[in-house]
Image (spheres, rainbow, N blue to C red):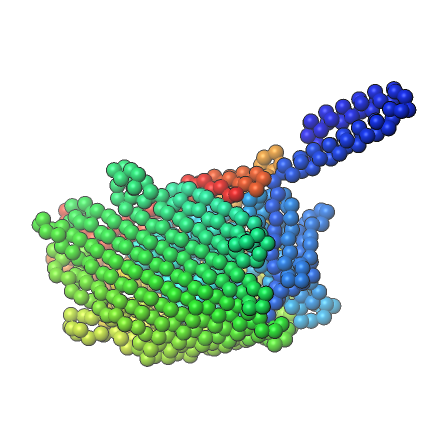
């Protein structure tokens, strides 16, 4: 640090005064020494102020044993490549703090006798927020001289140690930084190998599967889809995840052969975790942008205490503009959404840790249609309200066992009204209302019997309460549309029970095997299923590892599917006895740590789906279903087959830049009730992603950060069923040629996105300006099909959605 100019002036004055005093008698020498001491103290003070002027931050956290969950005292925690070495040790409760770190990125390593070293990469320290790390360490079960132990890197493995293949840890910081992430974890996942997505929706298709086959979880419990306007643009997707990056901690994304604790999913698990609020200091964030206005706050309930709170509220900017300038906003002002999320954490001395969490959303979309070519004169309205709330408790029962239990509730309300004007008459074509309550109790016991064997056994009981009433015309897109009929109506409740047990066996430092069993029973259809799971991981060499995993998985359908009525069956519920859809997952994995900052991963896989609900004309399958309602009588006669290989090459952020290249080559096929193998709707055949970014430190003390990130995606187009043009013209409506179901494919899509941000760090204050853009290339997507009455032909409806977000954020 260079001493500021005014400090130099004080040095000159000091030397001058010393010279003058030396010319006086010996009596004045004592006075000279007193003056010199005053100036030295003053210079030291000014110098320390100049040091403080450079913004600094801190990293705190806790270190625990990954198998038992117990805190580890006296662990060494250091900043890698620091000179002189910056480090500390954990206290008796496993807590640590690294203070007064200049803003920037750091790699943190924890070391402890008898444990494998653990490295956390790319930790961003800012001046206004304290970083919290939950470091999990794994016991070294061999003598130190038997093997060279390579540090475990947090980005190379999921948080759940039972997942040995087909899983990845998702960093919330990456969701903010990666182009196309848009602060939305769901959109971030589409950069991962094996995952495909779009622009207008954040639906997640894993390895060719339907987005509705993914299970969302929050705080270890199954939750409703936490996205705004979910299922409107396609079942399983929405526009934007309701859980802001301000709320989420690092989470797991599992894509194949997941551990036995997970049930009711066919394609994957999005296991999201809410972070705890800061229990030492108050921190606040306010942000305004194109997508919304939001405010977050966290801190201790009481200074010096251990309890903390965290909440975030967001309100749609388009709704705000619509309220203030309705004439200017037009239909865009009809896109209204808001969300509130919170978590409160209450550690106790002896009774364990209690937490209370939840989120809620309220959405409305109103649109006026005025397209005479398609006789689209009318108004669409969609209302959606969702909420999740829960109480969680964790208590240690000795040094090697803990019990974790929770009681949670899920609520969702969906209302849809579609009106079409024809011959000056208002015709309602869709009138649907669906209310669902789920109350769940979840509990598991985790026991580390010894360094080689850990077991987790748990149960889940879910009560499902529903009230649904669906009225639709036979063809909502046909003009005139005809009379509405009731296709599903019921209210009542059902129970779902599940139990599991899974064990992890570490035979040595190089070989780990996991086995488990999951069982489920659903009272509504009185069906049960048993699902075995198994996986092995072999660290063949310090930088090379191999894995293999198998899992049988099942899923019950959306509640309203069980209450479909058809015109031929009257009030009979044709789907009430529908069985679980099932799949066998097989996956291999190869990991190569090319260098400290470069990692390669390859995963071939095979998925065999069976007992898939199918119906209709013989080509209809749940695998391809995209509407949020169901009209068909279904049977479990369908099959599916997905196979392919995923590649990931990732350079971690080091020396200011990073990149991630992923590629997926796959085939996704299905059979309907006619037994013919066909392409699935989302059989894109290939997906290639290339993204990267560069950070520059700027400002006098290099305290500010300019970040530029880009992403490009090239993926195959969706498959679709062509029109029967003769029949369509004859009926003046859309008629498909089902003999060629999903034989046609759209052109490949090239999607580009970028993120540019500039963060200004000041003392306990930070400003960030950002420009984020999705689909710069204005790539079109399939949005549906309509009959054009002017040209007298059926047409595919293609549209391009480019989403910009200009935002300003302040942290204090």
**What residue is drawn where x is 70% and y is 33%?**
46
In the image, residue 265 above or below residue 335: below
Quadrant of res 504: bottom right
In the image, residue 152 above or below residue 179: below
Residue 530 lies, in percent from the top left, at: 42, 79
Residue 56, visible in the rendered structure: yes
**What residue is drawn where x is 69% and y is 27%?**
5
**What residue is drawn where x is 31% and y is 67%?**
558
Residue 519 lies, in percent from the top left, at: 43, 78
Q: Quadrant of the N terminus?
A: top right
Residue 7 lies, in percent from the top left, at: 71, 29
Residue 283 lies, in percent from the top left, at: 52, 47
**What residue is drawn where x is 88% and y is 20%?**
24
In this picture, residue 785 sits left or right of residue 807: left
Q: Residue furthest left?
A: 423
In the image, residue 570 above or below residue 229: below
In this picture, residue 433 sits left or right of residue 291: left
In the image, residue 125 above or below residue 234: above
- Number of marks present in the image shown: 0
Residue 175, visible in the rendered structure: no
In this picture, residue 511 sits left or right of residue 190: right
């Amino acid at each position: 640090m260079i001493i500021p100019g005014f400090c130099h002036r004080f040095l000159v004055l000091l030397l001058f005064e010393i010279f003058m005093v030396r010319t006086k008698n010996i009596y004045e020498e004592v006075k000279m020494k007193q003056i010199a001491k005053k100036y030295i103290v003053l210079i030291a003070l000014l110098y320390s102020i100049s040091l403080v002027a450079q913004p600094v931050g801190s990293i705190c956290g806790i270190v625990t044993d990954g198998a038992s969950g117990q805190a580890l005292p006296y662990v060494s925690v250091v900043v890698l490549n620091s000179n002189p070495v910056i480090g500390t040790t954990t206290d008796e409760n496993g807590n640590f703090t690294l203070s007064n770190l200049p803003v920037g990125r750091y790699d943190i390593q924890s070391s402890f006798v008898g444990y494998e070293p653990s490295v956390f990469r790319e930790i961003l320290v800012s001046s206004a927020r304290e970083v919290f790390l939950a470091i999990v360490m794994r016991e070294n079960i061999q003598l130190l001289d038997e093997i060279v132990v390579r540090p475990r890197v947090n980005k190379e493995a999921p948080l759940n140690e039972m997942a040995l293949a087909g899983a990845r840890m998702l960093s919330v910081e990456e969701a903010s930084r990666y182009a196309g992430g848009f602060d939305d974890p769901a959109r971030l996942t589409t950069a991962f190998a094996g995952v495909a997505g779009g622009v207008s929706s954040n639906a997640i298709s894993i390895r060719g599967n339907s987005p509705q086959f993914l299970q969302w979880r929050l705080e270890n419990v199954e939750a409703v889809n936490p996205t705004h306007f979910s299922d409107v643009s396609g079942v399983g997707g929405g526009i934007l995840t309701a859980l802001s990056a301000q709320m989420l901690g690092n989470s797991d994304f599992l894509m194949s052969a997941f551990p036995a604790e997970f049930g009711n999913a066919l394609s994957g698990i999005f296991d999201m975790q809410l972070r705890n609020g800061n229990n030492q200091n108050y921190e606040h964030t306010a942000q305004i942008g194109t997508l919304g206005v939001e405010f977050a706050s966290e801190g201790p309930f009481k200074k010096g205490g251990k309890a903390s709170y965290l909440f975030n509220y967001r309100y749609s900017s388009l709704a705000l503009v619509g309220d203030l300038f309705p004439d200017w906003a037009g239909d865009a002002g009809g896109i209204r959404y808001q969300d509130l999320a919170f978590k409160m954490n209450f550690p106790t001395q002896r009774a364990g840790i209690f937490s209370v969490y939840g989120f809620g959303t309220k959405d409305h979309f109103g649109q006026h249609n005025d397209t005479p070519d398609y006789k689209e004169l009318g108004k669409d309205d969609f209302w959606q309200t969702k909420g999740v709330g829960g109480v969680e408790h964790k208590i240690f029962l000795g040094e090697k066992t803990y019990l974790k239990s929770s009681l949670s509730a899920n609520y969702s309300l969906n209302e849809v009204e579609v009106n079409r004007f024809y011959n000056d008459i208002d015709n309602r074509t869709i009138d649907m209302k669906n209310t669902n309550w789920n109350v769940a109790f979840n509990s598991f016991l985790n026991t580390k019997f010894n360094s080689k064997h850990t077991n987790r056994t748990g149960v889940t009981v879910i009560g499902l309460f529903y009230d649904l009433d669906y009225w639709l015309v036979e063809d909502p897109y046909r003009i005139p549309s005809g009379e509405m009929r009731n296709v599903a109506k019921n209210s009542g409740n059902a129970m779902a029970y599940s139990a599991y047990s899974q064990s992890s066996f570490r035979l040595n430092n190089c070989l780990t095997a996991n086995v488990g069993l999951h069982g489920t029973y659903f009272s509504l259809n009185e069906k049960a299923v048993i699902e075995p799971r198994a996986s092995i991981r072999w660290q063949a060499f310090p930088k090379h590892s191999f894995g293999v995993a198998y899992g049988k998985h099942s899923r019950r359908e959306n509640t309203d599917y069980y209450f479909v009525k058809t015109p031929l069956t009257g009030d009979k519920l044709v789907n009430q006895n529908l069985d679980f859809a099932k799949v066998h997952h097989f996956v291999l994995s190869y990991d190569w740590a090319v260098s400290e900052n470069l990692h390669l991963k390859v995963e071939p896989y095979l998925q065999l789906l069976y007992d898939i609900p199918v119906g209709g004309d013989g080509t209809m399958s749940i695998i391809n279903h995209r509407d949020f309602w169901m009209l068909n009588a279904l049977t479990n006669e369908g099959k599916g087959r997905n196979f392919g290989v995923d590649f990931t090459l990732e350079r971690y952020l080091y020396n200011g830049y990073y990149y991630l290249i992923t590629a997926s080559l796959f085939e996704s096929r299905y059979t309907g009730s006619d037994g013919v193998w066909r392409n699935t709707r989302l059989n894109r055949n290939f997906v290639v992603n290339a993204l990267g970014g560069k950070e520059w430190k700027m400002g006098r003390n290099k305290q500010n950060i300019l970040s530029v990130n880009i992403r490009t995606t090239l993926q195959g187009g969706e498959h679709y069923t062509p029109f029967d043009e003769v029949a369509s013209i004859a009926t003046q409506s859309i008629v498909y040629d089902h003999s060629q179901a999903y034989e046609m494919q759209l052109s490949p899509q090239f999607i580009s996105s970028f993120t540019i941000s500039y963060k200004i760090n000041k003392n306990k204050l930070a400003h960030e300006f950002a420009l984020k853009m999705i689909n710069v290339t204005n790539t079109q997507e399939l949005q549906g099909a309509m009959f054009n009455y002017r040209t007298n032909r059926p047409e595919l409806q293609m549209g391009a959605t480019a989403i910009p977000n200009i935002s300003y954020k302040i942290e204090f």
